[in-house]
Image: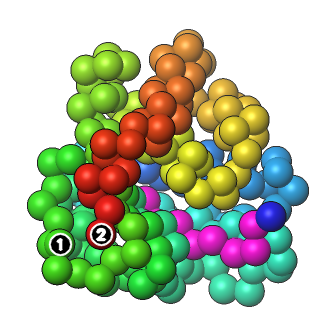
Amino acid sequence: MVSRKEIRLSGSGGQGLILGGIILAEAAILDGNNAVQSQSYGPEARGGASKAEVIVSSKAIDYPKVEKADVLLALTQIAYNKYINTLDSNGILIIDSTIEHDHNRNIHKVIQAPILSIASNKVGRAMVANIVAIGLIQQLTNVVTKNSLETAVLNRVPKGTEKLNKSALLEGYQLAKNKYYLEAASV
């Protein structure tokens, strides 16, 4: 099903993007695919630049870094500005609703959705924005199965937060079904 997908999750430290990347990679492996995950972040524990990269492939992965992202998630304006030029022309851009997007760019598909707001206001904790985002990514790309993603989430989140994170994942799935965001933001 998956031939090769390159995914970049970007934002700021403290948003859980590295954990999100680890979860996506684990889900891909549970699905029987190959996956590599890499990460980088600024020296600040919270608030500095952060990115996680995941490559999922049904074949061997010969280079572990994302060159042109098939999916770019940007949860901050700084991350959007820094990585927008790394998105493949046929890729999917997923940005939080707080980000100012340059609509003159030739991007295949743009999803602008209130990821941070849903995590804070609907799920009740800002720290689960990463899980909302990977639920949205799963629904938009099918890069991993829902079953494997749910298993990976429950394997990786801190003990005692399973119910909260499962709720965040379900909100991500639901967000993908909201045609207002999908159609209003598409180019």
Disc 1/disc 2 C-alpha distance (Å): 8 Å
Residue 51 image offset from top left, x and y in percent: 40, 62
Left or right of residue 96, residue 108 in this image: right
Q: Residue at x 25, y 20 (%)?
A: 121
Is residue 9 or residue 181 the one in the foreground?
A: 181
Asked if one can make out residue 137 in the rendered structure from this viewpoint, the answer is yes
| Image height of 45 relative to 108, above or below | above
Report the number of discs.
2
Q: Which residue is mark 2?
A: 187
Quadrant the N terminus occupies:
bottom right
| Image height of 61 relative to 19, above or below | below
Q: Which residue is mark 1?
A: 103
What's the magenta bit mostly, secondary-structure-wise? strand
Examine the structure image and report whether residue 18 is included in the region drawn in magenta.
Answer: no
Query: Do the residues under discs 1 and 2 have CB atoms within 8 angstroms?
Result: yes
Q: Earlier in the sequence, mark 1 or mark 2?
A: 1
| Image height of 77 relative to 147, above or below | below
**Amino acid under label 1?**
His
Determine which quarter of the picture holds residue 32: bottom right
Residue 72 image offset from top left, x and y in percent: 41, 66
Examine the structure image and report whether residue 6 is included in the region drawn in magenta.
Answer: yes
Left or right of residue 74, residue 108 in this image: right
Left or right of residue 80, residue 31 in this image: right
Asked if one can make out residue 44 in the rendered structure from this viewpoint, the answer is no
Q: Residue at x 53, y 53 (%)?
A: 140
Q: Residue at x 74, y 86 (%)?
A: 62
Q: The magenta stretch spans which residues? A: 2-11
Neighbour tally class for label 2: few under 14, some 14-19, many 20 plus, Cα within 10 Å: some
**Amino acid under label 2?**
Val
Quadrant the C terminus occupies:
bottom left
Residue 174 image offset from top left, x and y in percent: 48, 31
Q: Residue at x 33, y 28 (%)?
A: 119
